[in-house]
Image (cartoon, rainbow, N blue to C red):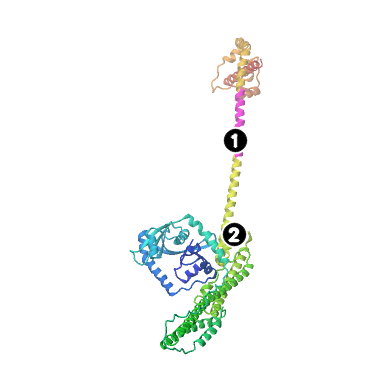
């Protein structure tokens, strides 16, 4: 929906209405209007020829606008908001719908429709009923504006006689709007002008003789009535039966004027004859017959002239429209992939008020030439725009709306194209960044999964190792218990052996020797140590394996302290104990 900055009643507003399907015409399209028939609307839309507005009709329009301006504050008082007249347009199923609203609130939720009041309309509103013929106009207004309801008002400039009622949308009626306009469009496209219906006029009937009462005396009528009658009939025979040229139209119009004069002359002659009182009855019948002949012929010829003029106007407008359509079709042949939409020139408006066929031809030719020039300019712009669009085939997917883009001016098109290309580049870069981040995320997740798998493997190995060690400890403990039970006799014997060796002075000397002070000087040679440990014999290398190194030497003899001797004794006892345990384990 678009709001148009058009003043209602202006030429620009009239041009907009001529190329739109207007809410005020929907009633006629549905066959509900009391002002214009559907067939007349089809003809008007197809030819572009609107009825001439006479002085009385223009006066009625002016009064309607005057009443509307007077009633606006009353409507604002009822609604509680200020109202603004607005012209709205929008496409619905590719149909150019329009609505000229007498008023709409700033929020757009309420509209106002005003009509000049009359007794019938006032009586209907007194009963709270809005006549059906006004419903379609308000319904289309609500559909285009998106308003919720419409205040319908009728007034004649007097608040006391003003009447109003609220109209709310009817889903049933709204569902009929688009199909109604589609059918009307089809009828407009299929419209073929028809020949005006022949005017049927009864042949003049001779008057019956008057009733004769009695007239005394002889009356004589003199004059040229028979000759005048013969001349009148010959004159009528020369009037063109179906004028086609400007000359014939002019002759027919002049004949109508002459016949009007003949009527007047016959009336004057009759009056003069009556004054002379002679052959009155015959004279009166002759005059009446000739007057009726002149009058009926004049009226028939006037209707014929009007009908033929309307037919010629319609024919010439339709010819101009057809020629324009052919020109657009030729231009369309050079434009591929885009439908060339050029507004039809307002041929009907161009010949408005003209009566001469020559002047009509001149105006139509000028309008046709101007329309072709406009079409050529538009077609050239579209062709250039299509070349611009085709210059970047790699971005063709960005311009799916070629139909709309082709109608832009070159600078706007380039800006739109650059904007879309930049947006596409940004989208591609963003997509690449998204893919990169996705790949990084996937790689990170894969590495994390691999690390987790490695940690799980390590935990599993550690768990297996711990379980194995636990099992080993359990097995060792179990062996210890088993061996302890099985080796009790051997242990007993070993202990007994130890007890037996304890009685040996040498062993007792080793076990019972007290450690020397830590700062004792080394005085024992390796030979002295072996002597005291006999039958055990140690070497310097053997003591070194126990971590005992001689702190001093004397004449190449290695000297050890008494603490080192004690350390050697403990090492020997430990080795003996380990050896005994080994024997027990083996047992």
Q: Which residue is mark 2?
A: 400
Coordinates of residue 471 in the picture (x, y in percent):
61, 23
Q: Which mark is residue 455?
A: 1
Q: Is residue 109 left or right of residue 415?
A: left
Few, some or many C-alpha atoms within 10 Å of disc 1 (few <14, some 14-19, many ≥20)? Answer: few
Residue 81 appears in the picture as rendered: no
Seen from the viewer's position, the closer of residues 491 and 416 is 416
Instruction: Of the two numbered discs 1 and 2 on the same chain, state the one appearing first in sequence.
Output: 2
Coordinates of residue 24 in the picture (x, y in percent):
47, 64
How many numbered circles does the render carry?
2
Q: Which segment did they paint magenta? A: 449-472
Q: On screen, 200 above or below 412? A: below
Q: Quadrant of the C terminus?
A: top right
Q: Which mark is residue 420?
A: none
Q: Nearer the viewer, mark 1 or mark 2?
A: 2
Coordinates of residue 79 in the picture (x, y in percent):
37, 59
Residue 77 appears in the picture as rendered: yes
In the rendered structure, does residue 453 fall within the stretch colored magenta? Answer: yes
Callout 2 secondary element: loop
Residue extending furthest left? Answer: 160
Few, some or many C-alpha atoms within 10 Å of disc 2 (few <14, some 14-19, many ≥20)? Answer: few
Seen from the viewer's position, the closer of residues 81 and 482 is 81
In the rendered structure, does residue 259 fall within the stretch colored magenta? Answer: no
Query: In the picture, residue 363 is in which quadrant?
Result: bottom right
């Amino acid at each position: 929906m678009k709001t148009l900055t058009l003043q209602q009643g202006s030429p620009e507003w009239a041009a907009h209405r001529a190329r739109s399907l207007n809410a005020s015409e929907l009633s006629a399209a549905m066959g509900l209007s009391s002002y214009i028939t559907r067939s007349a609307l089809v003809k008007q839309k197809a030819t572009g020829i609107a009825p001439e507005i006479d002085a009385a009709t223009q006066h009625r329009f002016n009064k309607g606008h005057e009443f509307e301006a007077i009633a606006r504050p009353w409507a604002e008082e009822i609604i509680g908001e200020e109202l603004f007249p607005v012209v709205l347009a929008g496409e619905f199923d590719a149909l150019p719908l329009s609505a000229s609203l007498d008023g709409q609130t700033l929020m757009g939720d309420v509209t106002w429709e005003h009509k000049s009041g009359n007794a019938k309309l006032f009586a209907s509103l007194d009963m709270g009923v809005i006549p059906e013929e006004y419903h379609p106009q308000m319904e289309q207004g609500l559909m285009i504006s998106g308003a919720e309801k419409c205040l319908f008002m009728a007034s004649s400039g007097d608040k006391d006689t003003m009447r109003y009622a609220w109209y709310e949308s009817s889903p049933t009626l709204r569902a009929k709007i688009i199909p109604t306009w589609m059918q009307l469009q089809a009828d407009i496209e299929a419209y073929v002008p028809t020949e005006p219906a022949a005017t049927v006029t009864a042949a003049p009937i001779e008057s019956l003789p008057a009733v004769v009462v009695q007239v005394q005396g002889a009356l004589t009528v003199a004059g040229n009535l028979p000759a005048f009658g013969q001349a009148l009939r010959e004159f009528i025979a020369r009037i063109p039966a179906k004028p086609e040229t400007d000359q014939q139209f002019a002759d027919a119009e002049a004949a109508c004027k002459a016949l009007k004069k003949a009527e007047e002359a016959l009336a004057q002659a009759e009056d003069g004859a009556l004054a002379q009182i002679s052959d009155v009855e015959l004279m009166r019948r002759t005059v009446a017959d000739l007057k009726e002949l002149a009058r009926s012929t004049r009226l028939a010829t006037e209707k014929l002239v009007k009908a033929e003029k309307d037919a010629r106007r319609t024919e010439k407008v339709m010819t101009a429209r057809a020629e324009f359509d052919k020109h657009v079709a030729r231009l369309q042949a050079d434009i591929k992939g885009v439908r060339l939409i050029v507004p039809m020139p307002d041929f009907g408006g161009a010949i408005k008020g003209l009566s001469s066929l020559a002047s009509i031809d001149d105006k139509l030719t000028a309008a046709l030439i101007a329309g072709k020039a406009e079409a050529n300019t538009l077609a050239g712009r579209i062709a250039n725009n299509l070349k611009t669009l085709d210059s970047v085939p790699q971005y063709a997917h960005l311009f799916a709306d070629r139909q709309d883009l082709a109608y832009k001016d070159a600078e706007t098109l380039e800006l739109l194209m650059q904007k879309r290309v930049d947006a596409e580049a940004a989208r591609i870069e963003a997509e690449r960044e998204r893919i990169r981040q996705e790949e990084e995320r996937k790689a990170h997740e894969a590495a994390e999964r691999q690390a987790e798998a490695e940690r799980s493997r390590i935990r599993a190995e550690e768990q297996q190792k711990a379980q194995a060690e636990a099992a080993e400890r359990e097995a060792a403990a179990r062996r210890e218990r088993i061996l302890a039970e099985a080796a009790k006799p051997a242990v007993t014997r070993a202990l007994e052996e130890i007890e037996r060796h304890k009685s040996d002075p040498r062993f007792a000397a080793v076990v019972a020797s007290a450690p020397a002070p830590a700062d004792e000087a080394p005085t024992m040679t390796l030979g002295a140590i072996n002597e005291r440990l006999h039958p055990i014999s140690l070497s310097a290398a053997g003591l070194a394996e126990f971590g005992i190194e001689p702190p001093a030497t004397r004449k190449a003899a290695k000297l050890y302290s008494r603490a080192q001797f004690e350390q050697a004794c403990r090492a020997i006892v430990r080795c003996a104990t380990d050896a005994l345990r080994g024997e027990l384990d083996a047992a």
